[in-house]
Image (tube, helix red, strand yellow):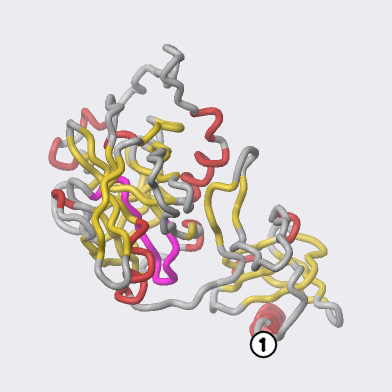
């Protein structure tokens, strides 16, 4: 009974205007509470609202955003401050939201973020990718460009309504992680504009049955959108955990995004099983960890020891029927 009363108070207070420089607790029912977090225990978060103190059970919390977690941005005089950006030790690389954005239709979201999803081409094949920021940093799968250094990125720019196709060929490999099937690239073309980019979400907040959609280039058909639900968030394949989804994933989708209905990237699509509705995506929290520690995975063409090479781990999949083995897309 006490737990239910505490939650109800939090929901009602979540809509009240509070100080902008405060910690924020986001709840499962899309409400939020802002204040000063006094303590975070194993099963409860205690937050000071200024005029009262609430105890919120962790079972009702989606995310806790502390003011101290964000690096303060310098705001030039006479200019509007840029969106909040999650930073690593070297430079701002991707954007995250401090507030819970409202859900919208796939049609609305595709118009907003579709330009940030690109096609990645090499002499050996193609895949998908997406821009992390306007400077041209993008994520794709390791297997999409494995063994390749000649890379092209095809972008569809929005120009007063119609889309304008542009291929950038000066693409540099920044970092790579074969185990997690991730690569960080950078478009270095001199005539490159500021690119549209996506906002990074939290894969831990995904729920089974939640609707998601993917944008990519299956079989080379660029800007293809497929929709489905989250089948599970903890599917284990070859010792790694993946998001399983019914959104159709096919060869060419690899490296593209899996979005929630708030327009946040929650995964990177990378493989499917034989059959329909068995797609898989790398959780975005794993991608954020790769980006924050990208110096450990740095790629240097002048160093013969890079990228680091490892022995293949023992595989139990050889004992399984080949029809159930995952195929990289």
Q: Is residue 229 above or below residue 52?
A: above
Give the quadrant of the N terminus: bottom right
Question: In the image, what residue occupies the spot 78% across and 70% down?
Answer: 47
Residue of label 1: 12
- Number of numbered markers: 1
In this picture, residue 205 sits left or right of residue 259: right
Give the quadrant of the C terminus: top left
Name the one closer to the observer, 73 or 61: 73
Question: In the image, what residue occupies the spot 39% across and 36% down?
Answer: 183
In this picture, residue 305 sits left or right of residue 277: right
Where residue 304 sits in the image (x, y, percent)? 42, 12
Displayed quadrant of residue 210 = bottom left
Whether 257 is among the magenta residues is yes
Name the one closer to the observer, 280 or 99: 99
Question: In the image, what residue occupies the spot 59% across and 79% down?
Answer: 31
Where residue 259 sits in the image (x, y, percent)? 38, 62
Q: Is residue 15 above or below residue 168?
A: below
Displayed quadrant of residue 99 = bottom right
Q: Is residue 228 above or below residue 234?
A: below
- Does residue 1 show up? no
Dot 1 lies on which element? Answer: helix
Question: In the image, what residue occupies the spot 64% across and 65% down?
Answer: 58
The magenta region covers 253-266
Where residue 149 sits in the image (x, y, percent)? 30, 27
């Amino acid at each position: 009974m006490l737990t239910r009363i505490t939650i109800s108070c939090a929901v009602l207070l979540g809509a009240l205007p509070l100080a902008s420089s405060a910690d924020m607790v986001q709840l499962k029912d899309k409400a939020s509470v802002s204040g000063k977090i006094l303590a975070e225990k194993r099963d409860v978060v205690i937050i000071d609202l200024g005029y009262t103190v609430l105890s919120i059970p962790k079972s009702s919390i989606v995310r806790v955003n502390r003011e101290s977690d964000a690096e303060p941005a310098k705001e030039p005089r006479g200019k509007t401050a840029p969106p909040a950006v999650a930073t690593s030790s070297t430079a701002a690389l991707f954007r995250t939201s401090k507030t819970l954005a409202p859900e919208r239709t796939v049609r609305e979201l595709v118009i907003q973020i579709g330009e940030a999803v690109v096609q990645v081409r090499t002499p050996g094949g193609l895949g998908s990718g997406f821009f992390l920021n306007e400077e041209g940093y993008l994520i794709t799968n390791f297997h999409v460009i494995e063994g390749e250094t000649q890379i092209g990125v095809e972008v569809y720019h929005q120009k007063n309504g119609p889309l304008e196709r542009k291929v950038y060929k000066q693409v540099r490999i920044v970092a790579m992680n074969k185990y997690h099937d991730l690569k960080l690239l950078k478009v270095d073309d001199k005539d490159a504009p500021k690119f549209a980019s996506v906002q990074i979400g939290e894969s831990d907040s995904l729920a089974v049955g939640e609707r998601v959609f993917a944008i990519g280039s299956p079989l080379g058909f660029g800007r293809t959108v497929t929709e489905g639900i989250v089948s599970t968030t903890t599917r284990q394949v070859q010792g790694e955990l993946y998001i399983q989804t019914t959104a159709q994933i096919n060869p060419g989708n690899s490296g593209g995004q899996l979005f929630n209905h708030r327009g946040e990237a929650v995964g990177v699509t990378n493989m499917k099983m034989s059959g329909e509705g068995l797609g898989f995506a790398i959780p975005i929290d794993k991608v954020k960890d790769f980006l924050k520690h990208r110096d450990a995975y740095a790629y240097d063409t002048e160093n013969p020891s890079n990228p680091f090479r490892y022995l293949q781990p023992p595989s139990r999949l050889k004992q399984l029927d080949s029809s159930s083995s995952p195929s990289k897309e």
